[in-house]
């Protein structure tokens, strides 16, 4: 018997497998299904969804976006974002969203910040599907949103999907 | 990808008390992108890092929610205000239940 699976063991395993498959989209181990991804939508819809009806103001004076003018490889485009803020408990940036206009799913990343960060800045590398605007949306602690954008030319698409 | 989940962190050798410094964090990860067939996304459980938690002196200071549109081997630079000598910890979580951690000591002078 040792090492060989009995019929009963097989049935138990099969039942467990079926239960696992049924629960798939909600378990911590299966968050990569399409339903759990940021939705496919135009960037304007993403901005509206994230702001949730709160005012979105022009933040070009406060938001600095550093990116190459021409990105040779859309698979990895460096970006540095800095939002001017005192970062005190009373007045700070709660979140920075980076959105790519030409990506089918425009939301690249959300960064949630606390005053302990000391600064509202971050850098990362983006996948960009095509030439277009990269938009930064900053959620302030008073509930308002600031936005600014940079145009980037992409030579080889990054298939960001 | 034998090295999947390897985490590298970099912090300045020392930081003056009260100053804002930057932590650089990297995880080796494929950060799978959504495949398309005939213009439609293919349904499956894509493996990518979708949550990153940064703690300093045991407190959460920054949290990130990357999507599939962050490059392979995700790299992030994160600010933190140095208040005391202690540990920074970065934990990366992926959509397949992967959990990858790195720590770095911050020396405050």
Image (tube, coloured by chain):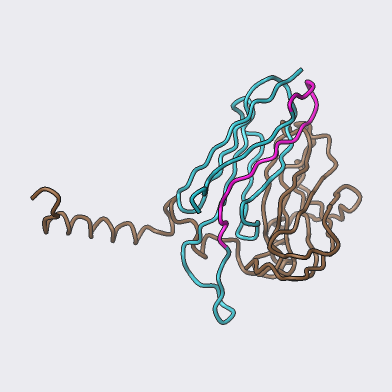
Chain colours: A brown, B cyan
Magenta stretch prevailing secondary structure? loop
**Horizontal relation, residue A133 to residue A94: left or right:** right
Quadrant for residue A4, please give it: bottom left
Q: Is residue B54 magenta?
A: no
Task: Please tell me which residue is depicted at 57% across the width and 47% down the height of the picture.
Answer: B51
Q: Is residue B29 magenta?
A: yes
Please state if A78 lies on the left or on the right of A62 as rendered: left
Most distant residue in the top direction: B109
- The front one of A10 and B6 is B6
- State the extent of the magenta-drawn residues as a range: B13-32
Q: Residue at x 52, y 65 (%)?
A: A34
Quadrant housing residue A67: bottom right
- Furthest residue to the right? A61
A58 to B38, vertically: above or below: above
Where residue A38 sits, quadrant-wise, is bottom right
Residue A75 in the image: state x and y as whole percent: 68, 63
Question: Is residue A3 or residue B109 the one in the foreground?
Answer: A3
Q: Nearer the viewer, residue B28 or A152?
A: B28
Kindly give the residue lying farthest to the bottom in the view shown: B38
- Say which quadrant the C terminus of chain A sits in: bottom right
**Image position, residue A156 (x, y; %):** 73, 70
Residue A42 place in picture, x, y as percent = 70, 70
Q: Is residue A39 above or below residue A139?
A: below
Q: Residue at x 77, y 44 (%)?
A: A140
């Amino acid at each position: 018997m040792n090492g060989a699976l009995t019929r009963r063991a097989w049935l138990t395993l099969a039942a467990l497998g079926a239960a696992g498959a049924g629960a798939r989209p909600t378990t911590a181990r299966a968050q990569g299904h399409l339903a759990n991804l940021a939705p496919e939508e135009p960037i304007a819809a993403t901005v509206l969804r994230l702001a949730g009806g709160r005012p979105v103001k022009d933040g070009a004076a406060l938001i600095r976006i550093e990116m190459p003018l021409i990105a040779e490889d859309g698979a990895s485009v460096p970006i540095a974002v800095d939002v001017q803020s005192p970062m005190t408990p009373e007045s700070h940036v709660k979140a920075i969203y980076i959105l790519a206009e030409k990506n089918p799913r425009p939301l690249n990343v959300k960064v949630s910040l606390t005053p302990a960060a000391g600064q509202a800045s971050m850098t990362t590398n983006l996948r960009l599907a095509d030439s277009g605007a990269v938009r930064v949306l900053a959620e302030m602690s008073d509930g308002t949103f600031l936005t600014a954008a940079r145009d980037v030319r992409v030579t080889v698409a990054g298939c960001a999907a | 990808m034998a090295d999947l989940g390897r985490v590298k962190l970099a912090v300045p050798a020392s930081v003056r008390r009260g100053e804002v410094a930057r932590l650089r964090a990297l995880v080796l990860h494929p950060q799978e992108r959504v495949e398309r067939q005939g213009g439609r996304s293919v349904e499956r459980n894509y493996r990518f890092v979708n949550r990153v938690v940064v703690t300093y002196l045991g407190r959460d200071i920054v949290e990130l929610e990357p999507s599939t549109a962050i490059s392979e081997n995700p790299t992030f630079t994160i600010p933190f205000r140095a208040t005391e000598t202690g540990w920074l910890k970065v934990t990366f979580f992926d959509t397949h239940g992967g959990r990858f951690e790195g720590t770095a000591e911050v020396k405050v002078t």
